[in-house]
Amino acid sequence: MTSPLSYLDIDTRDPAEYLAALDTLRWQKLQRQIRYVWTNEDYYRKRFLEAGIRAPEDLRTLADFRCLPAFIDKARHRESQDESLKRYGHPLGLHLTTTPENAIHLAATSGTTGTPTFYVFSRRDLEITCKVLGRLFRVAGIRPGDTTFHAFGLSLWLAGITYVQALEAYGARPVAVGAEGGVPKILRYIEITRPRVLFATPSMVNQLIERAQDEIGKPVGTLGIETVVVCGEPGGSQPIFRARVRAHFGAQTFDITGGAWHNGTITCDSRDAHGMHYMAEDHCFRYDLVDPETRLPLELKDGAVGEAIHTGLEYEASPAFRNATGDMLRLHVGECPGCGHFGVRMEILGRVDDMLMIKGVKAYPAALQKVVHEFQPKLSGELRIRLDAPPPKVNPPLQLIVEAGEGTPESTWPMLASALSQRIRELLSFRPNVTVQPFGSLPRSGAKTKLIEVVEA
Ligand SMILES: [Zn+2]
């Protein structure tokens, strides 16, 4: 299924013209997808009818489509699966838009909170996924014939078997030991198989750096890895992490997301990463932004900020169709200052649920974290936002706890605290009360550390 109009052929460097051409492409594909999803009586047709749409033809333009409410989110996805399990004996969701027999591949989220939600792929869905992921591999400089090493978890994660299949389809040779293999086995197999490219989470990359000498008697810099591809945790876009990978592996870093309903984004290799370069315009509409409060569509333009609604433009099995992602994004449209790539880049500001309101100013923990990271290595980068009542409303000033970096003299802490407070004032328009604590005093619990602590008085 190739569209006569590919976004790769859009021939303009003008952001407004570019976005208008994308709208044309989207609407062309969406008209067919709306009719397709309409056939799903168990779930999607009900959502259309609730929104007052009596027939697919009621939607005449992309603007009409963008005015529809969200049709699904994580919680409703889970309910849809529970209900299909009861009614039909499979967990593929009432929103399954093909037969269960056509659903040939599954991946899932972790399920740490409740049951996992499944990503369901038909054969064509998987083929397009491989094509989109292949674009990311190309940006990362991976070549057909390369040995790549897979240290992402394989257990149902998108970045696991799904990525391994995409790498094989691309012509690379993934060595799929997986995070489950454990650090010693991973290091030994890297030594034997000599990959040029490593796929791993930032915390796995850090462990490999720390343990290589003990496990294989040599530092990771001797292993010949030229490219490290990370995802699954924040951190991969931080200058300090990228510098660490350069220093220890002698390798460049690419941070990627994608695989879900044809999404695909990647940073470039520039020092500051400059956001996630969006690589799947022709297959999904990942940044249909709405105001998180009014739920009204926002004009898509450079600098726009809103909650992303995700719709697969031609997804076959259990598609994302007006799926409220809960991600707050800022769009950048134009040329990347780092690599010159022209297109849309997305900066994830945080989760809608994490929004804080400080005297009418909206702020996201991820945005605070980004400012704190500017102060590495003088600060460790760890932080907590301590509230005396549940968010979003914050009684000012916001209490921000940070950690000194290893070896940062205590005499400089007050100065660091005021510099950080001033920087947050400049960038985020409110002034927090910053407390600096000793290095190592904030508990680490991996990627999903909650940045907000509520200590009720
Ligand atoms: Zn770039």
Image: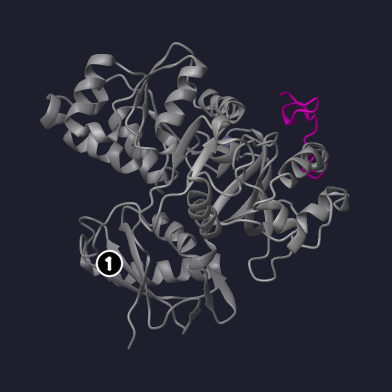
Q: Is residue 351 magenta?
A: no
Which residue is found at the position 23% from the left and 31% from the top?
Answer: 181
Which residue is found at the position 58% from the left and 33% from the top?
Answer: 339
Instruction: Count up the numbered dots.
Output: 1
Q: Secondary structure at mark 1?
A: helix
- 201 relative position to 206: left or right: right
Q: Position of residue 67 (x, y in %)?
A: 78, 59
Q: Position of residue 424 (x, y in %)?
A: 48, 67
Which residue is found at the position 29% from the left and 52% from the top?
Answer: 446
Q: Along the line of sight, which residue is nearer the eye, 234 or 213? A: 234
| Mark 1 nearby-residue class (10 Å; few <14, some 14–19, many ≥20) | few
Q: Which residue is mark 1?
A: 412
Q: Along the line of sight, which residue is nearer the eye, 454 or 362? A: 454
| Quadrant of image for the N terminus | top right
Which residue is found at the position 65% from the left and 51% from the top?
Answer: 42
Find the magenta span and give its range: 1-19
Q: Position of residue 153 (x, y in %)?
A: 33, 36
When the figure is inspected, residue 92 is found, relative to residue 361, above or below; the finding is above
- 185 relative position to 249: left or right: left
Query: Is residue 303 visible from the viewing direction of this image?
Result: no
Q: Along the line of sight, which residue is nearer the eye, 352 or 358? A: 352
Q: Amino acid at mark 1?
A: Thr
- 307 relative position to 398: left or right: right
Q: Along the line of sight, which residue is nearer the eye, 241 or 68? A: 68
Q: Quadrant of ligand 1?
A: top right
When the figure is inspected, residue 308 is found, relative to residue 88, above or below; the finding is below
- 175 relative position to 346: left or right: left
| Quadrant of image for the C terminus | bottom left
Q: Report the residue that reaches farthest toward the bottom.
A: 457
